[in-house]
Image (spheres, helix red, strand yellow):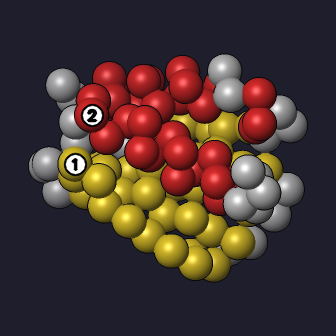
Amino acid sequence: MNFASLFDLIDAQLKTNSQLAGSHSSEADDERVWMRDAVAARVTPSGTTGIAVALLSGERVVHERIFAASPLSVTRIVRTITEHLTGYIN
């Protein structure tokens, strides 16, 4: 599965997540960014077999994690982004 397809799967789950009401996203060639208030999550390819998820507060990266570029990673990526954007209140 290519990066665009994986990113589409991630976006689809994030768009339907009721916890993320009020958030918005942007898309560039090899990057997806989800934002809510002053926090954001940037999703990019990492090499040829990984997906990098950078969690940001303002303009500063506070944590970055690499996941396998696999449909099996989508749920974990979505959970990581959701927890960051909701302030870990869940």
Identity of the residue drawn at 55% across and 37% down: 27
Q: Do the numbered discs 2 and 1 sit on residues whose CB atoms are within 8 Å?
A: yes
Q: Which mark is residue 68?
A: 1
- Cα gap from disc 2 to disc 1, whole angstroms: 8 Å
- Judge from the rendering whether residue 40 lies leftward or rightward of residue 78; answer left or right: right
Q: Quadrant of residue 1?
A: top left
Q: Residue furthest toward the front?
A: 90
Numbered circle sitting on residue 72:
2
Task: Please give the name of the residue rendered at 53% of the width and 45% of the height, measured from the top-left corner.
Answer: 79
Residue 77 x %, y %: 44, 46
Q: Label 2, secondary structure: give it.
A: helix
What is the residue that sits farthest to the left in this orientation?
48
Residue 32 visible to the viewer: no
| For residue 69, above or below residue 42 | above
Can you give x and y, in whole percent of width and height, for residue 8 in the image?
43, 24
The residue drawn where x is 44% and y is 57% is: 53
Q: Amino acid at mark 1?
A: Ala
